[in-house]
Image: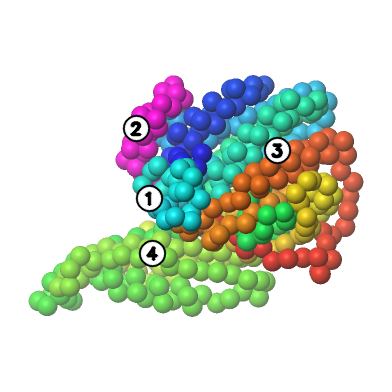
Amino acid sequence: MHRHPEPAWREFYTTARIVEEIRAIGVDELAVGPDAYDPADRMAVPEDYRFASWDERARERGADPDLLDRMAGGNTGAVAVIDRGEGPAIGLRVDIDALFIEESDETGHDPADEGFRSEIDGAMHACGHDVHMTWGLAVLEAIKESDFSGRLVVFFQPAEETSGGGCPMAKSDFAADLDYLLAAHVGLDHPTGEVIAGIEKPLAMAHIDATIHGTSAHAGKAPNEGDNAMHAMGTAIVNAYGIPRHADGMTRVNIGYAEAGSASNVIAEEAHMETEARGETTELMEYMTDELERTVKSAATMHGCRADVEVVSKSPRADSDPELQALVSEVANGVRGIDRVVPAADFGASEDATFLMERVQRDGGLATYLIVGTDHPTSHHTPTFDVDEDSLEHGVDVLVETIRELEHQHPVPHVDGPASVDERADAEGGG
Ligand SMILES: [Zn+2]
């Protein structure tokens, strides 16, 4: 998995390999791509021409051509179900996409030393999603071989890094009537042997693209005939950071990418920006998104231009349920190799697993997003990111034992509050 990283909505080979493993395990139901979700619900889908090289590479590497045909247009990912008699319906969500990062080939970087470095230039599993899908498969296998009674639905979700895949998975029929949802991430600055039973306060987030259309003109002879998209963009950027903070809680805004114009003596005709807005709650994220849109459009108008603003994707805030945090804590404490269990921690970043969490909670179920620690030499999203392989086993054991415990304790009794303040830790998220 680590050798074949693929970015959002281009997880062709990855999905085919996952499906191959699921078929070997043998499940009661398996849905791939458009059979797993409605493609119209996808967010942040790249333009068509961006799929071809990834599809081709997957074919060259021997991925099942029938599967690749079904994933045409970037409908990647899969859902697998084990359905066995009476018992709770439990969902497990793992993500499968990689990042546009060139993996280090330096000695001392284990994947390079041991020969499993990324084989795709400029792409890398630098957030541990290769670990997550391995967990997903191993959990399926363990539950299949057990005397589990109930329904287990494993979501192999594409496009987490762009917040694009959570929504379609959450809207799918597979997400209906789940009693419990588990989502899990490796690392995030927690060492091997540590488990966070449930994160809280992930930031709601929106990815927003804006294009400003102006009119070009000769910068010397007739600047008055132009409508300066460059100037409008500058005005928009300065004022975006001036959007008032909100009394209800924490907000964020960032202009992460901007380009405009063509030459020094031309009034710029077009400008493009890629931005994000976040908030402590979904409402605060919506507030920042609306204000950002108004700011960009007003800046365009001020300079005689017009702006198209597009929310490319977004994810809501969803918190882990105390009942599940308590159960995962109890289970993790008994897992071999786990020496520290933290009941709850603030997340500080964003995650689109919140779509599935929110769906399950809205339908009356419980959800938690847990972290399984790993000693990673450098931060997530860097060329020398690597995991401690012990966390592969830890993750599987914690998840399988949790699923078995849910089966026995169902319905899980109500508890108040996740943890006392001194038991909390700060978690630093990836997304
Ligand atoms: Zn991640």
Is label 3 or label 2 in front?
A: 2
Label 3 residue SS: strand
Looking at the rendered structure, the kind of residue marked 3 is Gly
The amino acid sitting under disc 4 is Tyr
Q: In the rendered structure, which disc, 2 or 1, sits on the residue that comes first in sequence?
A: 2
Q: Which amino acid, by three-letter code, is at mark 1?
A: Gly
Mark number, residue 91: 3
Residue carrying label 4? 257
Please tell me in which quadrant of the rendered image residue 71 appears.
top left
Q: Dot 1: what SS?
A: loop
Callout 4 environment at 10 Å: few (<14), some (14 to 19), or many (20+)? few
**Numbered circle sitting on residue 356:** none
Which numbered disc covers residue 122? 1
The magenta stretch spans residue 99: no
Q: Is residue 198 left or right of residue 420?
A: left
Front-lying residue, 117 or 341: 117
Q: Earlier in the sequence, mark 3 or mark 2?
A: 2
Q: Is residue 64 magenta?
A: yes
Query: Which element type, helix, strand or loop, lies under badge 4?
Result: strand
The CA distance from mark 4 to mark 3 is 36 Å
Amino acid tagged 2: Glu
Query: Image point 83% across, 62% down: which residue?
Result: 419
User: Majority secondary structure of the magenta segment?
Assistant: helix
Mark 4 and mark 3 lie on one chain; the one further toward the N terminus is 3
Ranked by sequence position, the earlier of labels 4 and 1 is 1
Label of residue 56 in the image: 2
Crowding at dot 2, Cα within 10 Å, few <14 / some 14-19 / many 20+, comes out as: some
Provide the residue span drawn in magenta: 45-67
Inter-mark Cα distance, 2 to 1: 17 Å
Q: Is residue 147 visible?
A: yes
Which one is in front, 395 or 193?
193
Residue 148 on image: x %, y %: 79, 28
